[in-house]
Image (cartoon, rainbow, N blue to C red):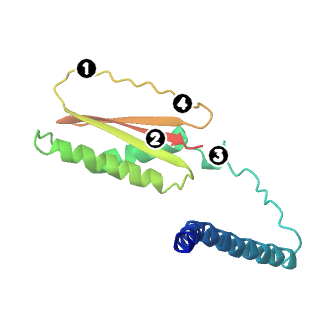
Amino acid sequence: GMAQKRAQDVLSTAELWPILACSRLLSTLDRACQRLEHCTRVAGGMAQKRVEENTYVIHPEYRKKFRTDVARPIIKEVLQTKLDKAQYNIETTQVLAKQVADDIKDRLKELELPRYKIVVQVAIGEQRGQGVRMGSRCFWDADTDSSASETYSNESLFCVATAYGVYLY
């Protein structure tokens, strides 16, 4: 009788232990929240939701646009400087095309056009008197995005370089 009753009391206390522990934890958290609330009120009134204005700029200033009339002379200068005495060589032309593209991109980045992604494509071929036609199509915002293209040729090679300025919203 009495021993069995005592075992049931121990069992029920063991079952209540997790509930009591959770209750203490909740009580501690509640006191911490009350202190935080008090500190917020003391620090300057009730906490207010901070509202920030939209910072998205959807159009660049005119002076900071990628403009064809500014980019073309830069491309032309790089082509003349890099390719003036160059001879077409199937092994070295791939490296030369990459160098020309990198030089054009670096020079255009010096214009410091904020939020513009500059993409440069350079094609170099052997000069054999053949005709070459190149074209490109882009799906973009005509108000902010633009391209500039320039060609160069000497006795040994021809080159077509195109730079695209794409504005990031």
Q: Label 4, secondary structure: give it.
A: loop
Q: Label 3, secondary structure: give it.
A: loop
Furthest residue toward right: 45
Label whose residue precedes the other's in the sequence (1 or 4) = 1
CA distance for labels 2 and 1 = 22 Å
Please say whether residue 107 is visible from this viewpoint: yes
Q: Label 1, secondary structure: give it.
A: loop
Hey, what amino acid is under mark 3? Pro
Nearer to us: label 3 or label 1 = 3
Name the mark on residue 140.
Answer: 4
Q: Position of residue 168 (x, y in %)?
A: 55, 44
Can you identify the residue that label 1 sits on? 131
Residue 158, relative to residue 129: is it above or below? Answer: below
Q: Nearer the viewer, residue 29 or 39?
A: 29
Residue 19 lies in quadrant? bottom right
Label whose residue precedes the other's in the sequence (2 or 4) = 2
Label whose residue precedes the other's in the sequence (3 or 1) = 3
CA distance for labels 3 and 1 = 38 Å
Label whose residue precedes the other's in the sequence (4 or 3) = 3
Q: Position of residue 103 (x, y in %)?
A: 34, 52
Label whose residue precedes the other's in the sequence (2 or 1) = 2
Could you tell me which residue is drawn at 86 percent across and 79 percent down? Answer: 42
Can you identify the residue that label 2 sits on? 72
Residue 159 lies in quadrant? top left
Hey, what amino acid is under mark 1? Gly
Can you identify the residue that label 3 sits on? 60
